């Protein structure tokens, strides 16, 4: 049980009003770190755009929504501390990383410094370009950021690129990307920040060469849309917007970009800072409810400022048991939607799978207690 | 005027029945080479999947449609003469090319032989990987394929890759990719075929290492979905399906993949060979109607087996005049939807912009005559 008071209850009401209720959907969705629940307005905007495409043709339809999509650029720029012309739309965070690496043309064999929480598919992407990930160890043995030793490492072994994963996929511990990005930029090392798990959830005003993310998680936009926010002067030898035109895909799921713009139109009036405060409190609440239940252990410190909770199973459980619990939860009525996060998501530090719980603004104590009760009794 | 008889009139009826009528949409759509008109069923499938995602979560929804998407793989394999496990879904034809080039890891500076009709953005993509496009000139002065001199060129200057654009974006002349692909494969040169304009329109059973394309044009699937069909053994050192897993994007617009699967469910029962025959006759019909009207000249031979017609303006017209005509046509009531195709689309051979007309199965002689009448009288 937990005595955490969630701030900004009006956000829960607004969030819930924009969506079907769990009672109507038959599912209790605790999986925003995978893909958030699109609102009715987001889906309606996508549907309307597809209908428009079928009526007047895909490219004519695109011309008619470019202003609305540009509104999305302005919102992303505001959330990431940049300029709208530096926002490039892509199909996913990974596609944004790929496009930037392609434009950067780092020589094969170049070292890329990453954090231990780095996302597995990002490591594959770096290696596909012939780059060699090395790990920054800016942490003391007690898990605190050690700025001095991180700086020493960057000085002694300067990488060609600093690629910082803001929040991993396999545990909800927020990384000190703000400090590390500054450190990289001071040394003339290009800095990319993967904010796929951070956008709409953590403060993304980070002074990096680019910060990139996705529509579908905490922002609750559609799948199939990502973005990068480029600092002026980053790519393209003086092209405007840091060379965003080199990163944006020209042929695209335009209806999805409209959907993301609408998700941002819903997010901004809520107050992004308030959303972050409530989400962080929700993480604390969830950890309080779930810690120790049935022998499951919460990975994050209880007050970690993220809404991600990951749970290690009782000793003796294997990864497939964790996956089986996720499946069991899905089979309930109503279904409880979570993620089994295998160690391949964070291969530099994860050694075993976890159950990931990532509720959004409207989560209730009842829902968390229901999950906790299942942890108490479920056995493989 | 033209006396061409269009074969398979039942296809026009089926195609029209699956869509709103031009009367209902307020537009006469002659622009399938840009993006075809999605049917009601395609849009409904996308909408339903988005609703499902919002109810049960994006990844749970994905699991529920993977069989339907695999049906799309089977249809693509049948249309491209390959195996379903070699089909990789991407976000666009360009994304497929990018993924394959990334996986191929050709050394920078490698020569890539292309045809003079090569699509401008493909050339940019090749150059972004540090590759150097060179032109294959397999044509005699009268425009016929000269297999002997093409073979000599490949023998004398063997490229690291043969990249063949089946049908350009700026003119509707079908390229002899079948013969050239065989020539490349016989010489151990990897062969990629860009069938973005060919899929659902031309016979795509070409013996290449990979053939790739897009959902949105002649197949009338959604924007934001592309594919590659890989030959067994192409990439990934013995991975199944030619390494398709290296090319398929793992995070994606899944609703769009469902939409493409539905577009294929509609296409296959029509009879792909019949669709091709009717589309080719439509090209001939359109050229017959439009040639010479108001001094506009048709670029293609009248009987060219494609449904693309491109029109050069009367002498004295500039590119911006052609673009202005496209805009004028859009402003009519009902709108006539065409494309202004600038020379940047085919920079190796195009020197001026054209008006591109690309009707689909249900086009009528009345619609073509209406456009011809406007060509007669319109002046910049």
Image (cartoon, coloured by chain):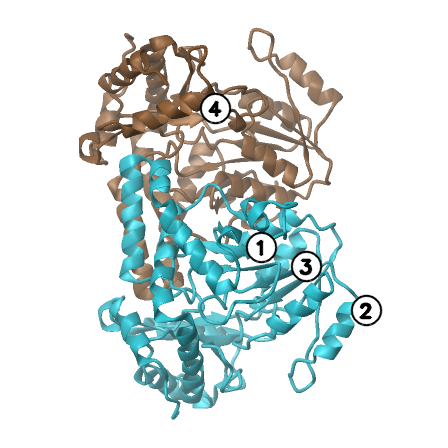
Chain colours: A cyan, B brown
Q: Secondary structure at mark 2?
A: helix
Residue at mark 3: chain? A
Q: Residues within 10 Å of mark 4 (few under 14, many from 20)?
A: many
Question: How far, Cα to Cα, is label 4 from label 2?
Answer: 54 Å
Disc with the residue nearer the chain's start (1 vs 3):
1
Above or below residue A209? Residue B88 is: above
Q: Tell me the quarter of the image containing the N terminus of chain B.
A: top left
Are both tags, 4 and 2, on one chain?
Answer: no
Q: Give the position of the C terminus of chain B as an image quadrant.
A: top left
Residue A190: which disc? 3
Q: Quadrant of residue B280?
A: top left
- Position of B26 with respect to A11 (left or right) is left
Mark 1–mark 2 distance (CA, rounded to whole Å): 26 Å
A3 or A33, which lies in front? A3
Is A77 placed left or right of B44 in the picture? right
Q: Are marks 2 and 3 in contact (CB under 8 Å)?
A: no
Picture quadrant where residue B377 is located: top left
Q: To which residue does mark 2 refer? A: A156
Q: Out of B137 and A59, give the one closest to the viewer.
A: A59
Label 2 marks a residue whose chain is A
The mark closer to the camera, 1 or 2, is 2
Residue drawn at 70 percent across, 55 percent down: A131
Q: Residues within 10 Å of mark 2 (few under 14, many from 20)?
A: few
Q: Position of residue A77 (x, y in %)?
A: 48, 59
Chain letter, disc 4 residue = B
Q: Residue furthest front?
A: B380
Give the CA separation, mark 3 to mark 4. Answer: 39 Å
- Per the image, label 3 sits on a secondary structure element best described as loop
- Quick check: B376 above or below A1? above
Residue of label 4:
B170
Element on which disc 1 rests: helix
Kindly identify which residue carries mark 1.
A97
């Amino acid at each position: 049980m937990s005595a955490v008071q969630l701030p900004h209850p009006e956000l829960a009401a607004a969030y819930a009003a924009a969506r079907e209720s769990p009672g109507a959907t038959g599912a209790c969705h605790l999986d925003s770190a995978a893909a958030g629940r699109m609102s009715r307005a987001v889906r309606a905007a996508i549907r309307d755009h597809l209908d428009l495409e079928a009526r007047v043709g895909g490219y004519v339809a695109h011309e008619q929504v470019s202003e609305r999509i540009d509104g999305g650029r302005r919102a992303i720029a505001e959330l990431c501390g940049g300029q709208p012309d530096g926002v490039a739309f892509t199909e996913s965070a990974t596609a944004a990383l790929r496009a930037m690496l392609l434009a950067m043309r780092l020589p094969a064999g170049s070292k890329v410094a990453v954090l231990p929480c780095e996302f597995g598919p990002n490591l594959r992407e770096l290696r596909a370009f012939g780059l060699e990930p090395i790990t920054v160890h800016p942490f003391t043995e007690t898990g605190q950021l050690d700025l001095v030793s991180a700086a020493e490492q960057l000085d002694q072994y300067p990488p060609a690129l600093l690629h910082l994963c803001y929040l991993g996929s396999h545990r909800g511990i927020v990384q000190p990307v703000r400090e590390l990005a500054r450190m990289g930029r001071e040394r003339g090392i290009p800095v990319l920040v993967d904010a796929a798990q951070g956008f709409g959830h953590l403060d993304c005003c980070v002074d990096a060469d680019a910060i990139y993310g996705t529509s579908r998680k905490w922002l609750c936009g559609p799948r199939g849309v990502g973005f990068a926010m480029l600092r002026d002067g980053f790519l393209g030898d003086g092209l405007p917007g840091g060379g965003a035109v080199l990163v944006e895909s020209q042929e695209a799921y335009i209806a999805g970009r409209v959907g993301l713009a609408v998700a941002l139109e819903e997010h901004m009036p809520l107050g992004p800072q308030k959303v972050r405060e409530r989400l962080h409190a929700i993480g604390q609440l969830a950890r309080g409810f779930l810690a120790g239940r049935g022998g499951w252990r919460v990975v994050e410190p209880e007050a970690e400022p993220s809404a991600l909770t990951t749970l290690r199973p009782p000793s003796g459980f294997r990864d497939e048991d964790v996956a089986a619990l996720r499946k069991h939860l899905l089979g309930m009525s109503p279904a409880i939607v979570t993620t089994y996060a295998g160690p391949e998501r964070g291969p530099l530090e994860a050694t075993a799978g976890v159950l990931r719980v990532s509720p959004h603004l409207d989560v209730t104590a009842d829902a968390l207690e229901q999950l906790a009760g299942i942890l108490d009794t479920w056995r493989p």
